[in-house]
Image (spheres, rainbow, N blue to C red):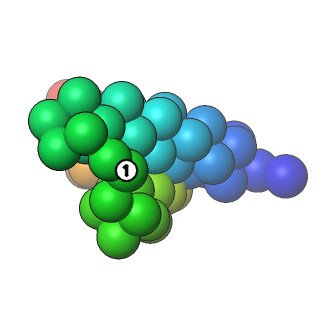
Amino acid sequence: MSKRTKDGMISALVFAFVAILSVYFIYGEVKWSTVIGLWIGGFISWCFIIPKINKLRRRDKS
């Protein structure tokens, strides 16, 4: 498994955990649509978007 995929899965789990806690404390129940949305968004952002931004930063500094 590549580093990008591992980072994406770890961040997706962290995003989902934080979503479960925050939504539960705000609404008193878990809204699964919010949790699933943040889970998918966390995976996409850390697997595709963040590596692209880091690559562009490294190229600009050189």
10 Å crowding of disc 1: few (<14), some (14-19), many (20+): some
Q: In terms of depth relative to the viewer, which is nearer, 31 or 34?
A: 31
Left or right: where does residue 14 sit relative to residue 58?
right
Q: Mark 1 points at which residue?
A: 30
What is the tally of numbered marks visible in this picture? 1
> Would you identify the image quadrant in which residue 59 lies?
top left
Residue 56 seen in this snapshot = yes
Q: Where residue 3 appears, x then y in whole percent?
A: 69, 42
- From what the image shows, is residue 26 above or below residue 5? above
Q: Helix or strand or loop: what does disc 1 sit on?
A: loop
- For this orientation, the residue located farthest to the right is 1
User: From the viewer's perspective, is residue 15 above or below residue 36?
Assistant: above
Give the residue drawn at x 14%, y 36%.
Answer: 26
Q: Name the residue type under label 1.
A: Val
Res 44 seen here: no
Image point 47% across, 35% down: which residue? 17
Image-quadrant location for residue 19: top left
Q: Quadrant of residue 38?
A: bottom left
Q: Name the spot of residue 48 as percent of width and height, x first.
A: 43, 62
For the C terminus, which image quadrant? top left
